[in-house]
Amino acid sequence: MDQWLSLQIFEAGADEERLDALVGYLRTELLELDIVDLAKPSGRDLPLGARGAVADADAAGGLLVALGQSMQSLRSVVVAVSAWLRRGDNGQRTVRLELGGDVLELARASSDEQKRLVELFISQHTPQDSG
């Protein structure tokens, strides 16, 4: 079964229209990646298997990413989101990622602590080699 990663975009002072635009920009970049599926949740029409992954993603600014069985796609998504945040013209933007009950919030700042948290988040969702 695919794992669903919930993304929620926040920006200080942004209204629903602005958040929808930001989702569109990020969605365009994520579609370039090797992911199984990408959806904008509508509450009633969530993809199969995604309902448990999303509590508040029905609001503007939400995306669901189906990662499939390869956790390399998780790393690709996190790297893409981080790069997208760094290129943004607003330092007050945050993306909240949730997978399997674990939450990671990314902001434009790229500190060593944030890098460590990203690696920890990814490693918690990456199957360990048995050999």
Image: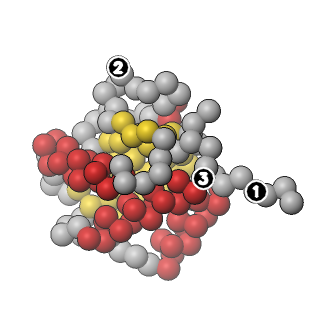
Q: Mark 3 or mark 2: which comes first in sequence? A: 2
Q: Nearer the viewer, residue 47 or 59?
A: 47
Q: Which residue is mark 1?
A: 128
One can see residue 83 in this view? yes
Q: For mark 3, what is the residue?
A: 71
Is label 3 or label 2 in front?
3
* The quarter of the displayed image where residue 121 is located: bottom right
Separation of marks 3 and 2 at Cα, in angstroms: 28 Å
Q: Is 66 placed left or right of 107 in the picture?
A: right
Secondary-structure class at tag 2:
loop
- Name the foreground residue: 84 vs 116: 84
Q: Which residue is mark 2?
A: 44
As measured in the structure, the alpha-carbon distance from the residue carrying label 1 to the one carrying label 2 is: 35 Å
Tell me what residue is drawn at x 61 percent, y 64 percent.
Answer: 120
Q: Position of residue 111 (x, y in %)?
A: 44, 78
Taking 47 as reference, is 2 above or below it? below
Residue type at numbered disc 3? Met
